[in-house]
C-alpha cells in the first residue's frame, strides 16, 4: 500500500487549484494539456501530444520486464457554467468552470503517473490517457478515430468519476451498465402561418408540437419494459412571438437515454414513426435530426471485480458499494470501453457536495490522494500481482 507525503498531497492540491482557476472547454484545453505534458515529461515519461486535438498520452514501461499494457484515462475539459463559489481557486475564465470535477480527475492521474514513474515496480506498460472534450463533444471517440488504440494498444482501460452524494472514502463499482447511452434530437415542424382568427387557412405546427411533447414520452412509458430503464425528455420548445399570428415553424429539441443497444434502436425507429404520423395528420413538413451521441458505459464484470478488490483493500470492504443503480447520465468513456474491456468507477465527492454541473460544485481535495492510491494499487494488482484477466 503506497502512502503519499504531505508535500505530495500539497502538490496535488496546487495542480488541481491551478486547473480549476483556468478551466477550458471542449478541444480548447491548450493550457491544461500543455501543463499535463510538461509535468509528465518532467517525471521521465514518454509523452505524445496532439491526439484528438488537445489529448495527451504518456507511456510508462515497468522495470520488471515485458508484460501486458493497460490504459488509465482522465478527462480534462470544463463546462460553460459561471462559478458562484467564493474560493481562492475560483475560475478566472468568465462563463467557464470545472463543474464536473475533471480538474480533479486530471490531477489524480497525474499523481499516479508521478508515483509510478518514480518506482515503476511492475511488468508491462501503463498508458496514461488525458482526453479532451468529454462533455457533449466525444473527445474519447475522436482520440480513438485518430488511432489511440492502434498506436498504444491496451488490453483493458480504466477510469473514474467523482460522485456527489457519496461520502469521501466510499466508492461504487458496477458489474455491467453504469452510465446510459445518450441520443439527441432536433425537430423542425413547418406548417403554414396564418391569422390567429382564421386557423382554417393555415396548418398548425404549434398544436402538433404540443401533442408531440405530451405523446412522445409514451414511447417509453407505454412501449418499453418497465425493468429496462429509459427516459425521453423534450427540453426545448421554440415557436411564435406575438398574439395574433399562428407561427409557421416550431422547433423542438431533447434527449433519449437507455442502456440496451437494441432497445435504443427500437426507440429511435418508433420516434421516427411518431413524428411522421403526427406530421402527416396535421399536414406538416417534419425535418428530424436524430443523433446517436454516446453509447452506454458497460463495465466488464471480470475486471470490475478486481477494481472492487483493490478498492476494498484501500477503503475497507464496507466502503465499496456494489449495489447502486446506474446513472441515466452519460459518459464518453463508453467509446473506450467498447473498444476493449473497461471499468468506470464512482468515487465519493462528499455527501454535502453540490451536484455535478451545478455552479456551486467543487471537486473535493480530500479525494485527490485516495484517487492516486487507487490508480497505483490497481496497476500493481494488474501488472505486478498478475491479476489482469487474460
Ligand atoms: Zn459532466
Ligand atoms: Zn464529468
Image (cartoon, grey):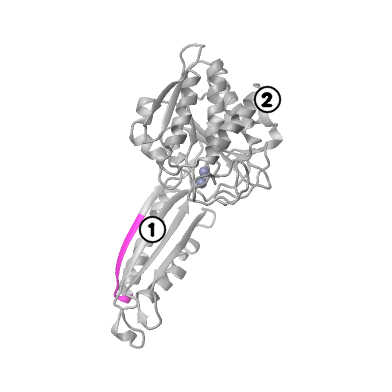
Left/right placement of residue 194 relative to residue 367 reads left
Query: What distance separates the C-alpha of mark 2 from that of mark 1?
Result: 49 Å
- Percent of width and height locating residue 195: 33, 84
User: Looking at the image, which residue is at 67% across and 27% down?
Assistant: 313
Q: Quadrant of residue 90?
A: top right
Left/right placement of residue 63 relative to residue 261 reads right
Tell me if residue 244 can be seen. Answer: yes
For the residues carrying marks 2 and 1, which lies nearer the camera in this image? 2
Give residue 87's mark: none
The N terminus - image quarter: top right
Give residue 185's mark: 1
SS class, disc 2: helix
- For disc 2, the marked residue is 6
Magenta: main secondary structure equals: strand
- Percent of width and height locating residue 240: 38, 74
Within-10-Å neighbours for mark 1: few <14, some 14–19, many 20+: some
Q: Nearer the viewer, residue 66 or 373?
A: 373
| Relative vertical location of residue 334 with respect to residue 67 in this rendering, above or below | below
- Check if residue 288 falls in the magenta segment: yes
Provide the residue span drawn in magenta: 282-290
- Percent of width and height locating residue 102: 52, 39
- Percent of width and height locating residue 351: 68, 46
User: Looking at the image, which residue is at 68% across and 25% down?
Assistant: 6
Furthest residue in direction bottom, as rendered = 197
SS class, disc 1: strand
- Ligand 1 within 8 Å, label 1 CB: no
- Check if residue 289 falls in the magenta segment: yes
| Relative vertical location of residue 36 with respect to residue 230 in this rendering, above or below | above
The numbered mark, 2 or 1, whose residue comes first in the sequence reads: 2
Q: Quadrant of residue 29?
A: top left
Q: Nearer the viewer, residue 245 or 272?
A: 245
Amino acid at each position: 500500500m503506497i502512502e503519499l507525503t504531505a508535500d505530495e498531497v500539497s502538490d496535488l492540491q496546487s495542480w488541481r487549484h491551478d486547473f480549476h482557476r483556468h478551466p477550458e472547454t471542449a478541444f480548447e484545453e491548450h493550457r491544461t494539456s500543455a501543463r499535463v505534458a510538461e509535468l509528465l515529461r518532467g517525471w521521465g515519461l514518454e509523452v505524445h501530444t496532439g491526439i484528438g486535438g488537445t489529448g495527451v498520452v504518456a507511456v510508462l514501461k515497468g522495470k520488471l520486464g515485458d508484460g501486458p499494457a493497460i490504459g488509465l484515462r482522465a478527462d480534462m475539459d470544463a463546462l460553460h457554467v459561471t462559478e458562484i463559489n467564493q474560493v481562492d481557486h475560483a475560475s478566472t475564465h468568465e462563463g467557464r468552470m470545472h463543474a464536473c470535477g475533471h480538474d480533479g480527475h486530471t490531477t489524480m492521474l497525474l499523481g499516479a503517473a508521478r508515483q509510478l514513474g518514480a518506482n515503476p515496480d511492475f511488468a508491462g506498460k501503463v498508458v496514461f490517457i488525458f482526453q479532451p472534450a468529454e462533455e457533449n463533444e466525444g473527445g474519447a471517440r475522436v482520440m480513438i478515430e485518430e488511432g489511440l488504440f492502434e498506436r498504444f494498444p491496451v488490453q483493458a482501460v480504466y477510469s473514474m468519476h467523482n460522485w456527489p452524494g457519496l461520502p469521501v472514502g466510499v466508492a461504487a463499482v458496477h458489474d455491467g451498465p453504469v452510465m446510459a447511452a445518450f441520443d439527441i434530437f432536433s425537430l423542425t415542424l413547418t406548417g403554414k402561418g396564418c391569422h390567429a382568427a382564421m386557423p382554417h387557412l393555415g396548418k398548425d405546427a404549434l398544436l402538433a408540437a404540443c401533442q408531440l411533447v405530451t405523446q412522445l414520452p409514451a414511447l417509453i412509458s407505454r412501449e418499453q419494459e418497465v425493468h429496462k430503464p429509459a427516459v425521453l425528455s423534450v427540453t426545448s420548445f421554440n415557436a411564435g412571438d406575438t398574439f395574433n399570428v399562428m407561427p409557421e415553424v416550431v422547433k423542438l429539441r431533447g434527449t433519449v437515454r437507455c442502456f440496451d443497444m437494441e432497445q435504443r434502436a427500437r426507440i429511435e425507429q418508433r420516434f421516427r414513426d411518431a413524428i411522421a404520423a403526427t406530421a402527416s395528420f396535421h399536414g406538416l413538413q417534419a425535418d428530424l435530426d436524430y443523433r446517436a451521441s454516446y453509447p452506454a458505459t458497460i463495465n466488464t464484470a471480470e475486471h470490475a471485480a478486481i477494481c472492487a478488490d483493490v478498492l476494498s483493500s484501500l477503503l475497507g470492504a464496507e466502503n465499496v458499494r456494489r449495489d447502486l443503480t446506474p446513472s441515466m447520465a452519460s459518459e464518453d468513456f463508453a467509446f473506450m470501453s467498447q473498444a476493449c474491456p473497461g471499468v468506470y468507477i464512482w468515487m465519493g465527492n462528499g455527501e454535502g457536495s453540490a451536484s455535478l454541473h451545478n455552479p456551486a460544485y467543487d471537486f473535493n481535495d480530500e479525494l485527490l490522494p485516495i484517487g492516486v492510491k487507487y490508480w497505483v494499487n490497481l496497476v500493481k494488482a494488474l501488472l505486478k500481482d498478475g491479476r489482469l484477466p487474460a
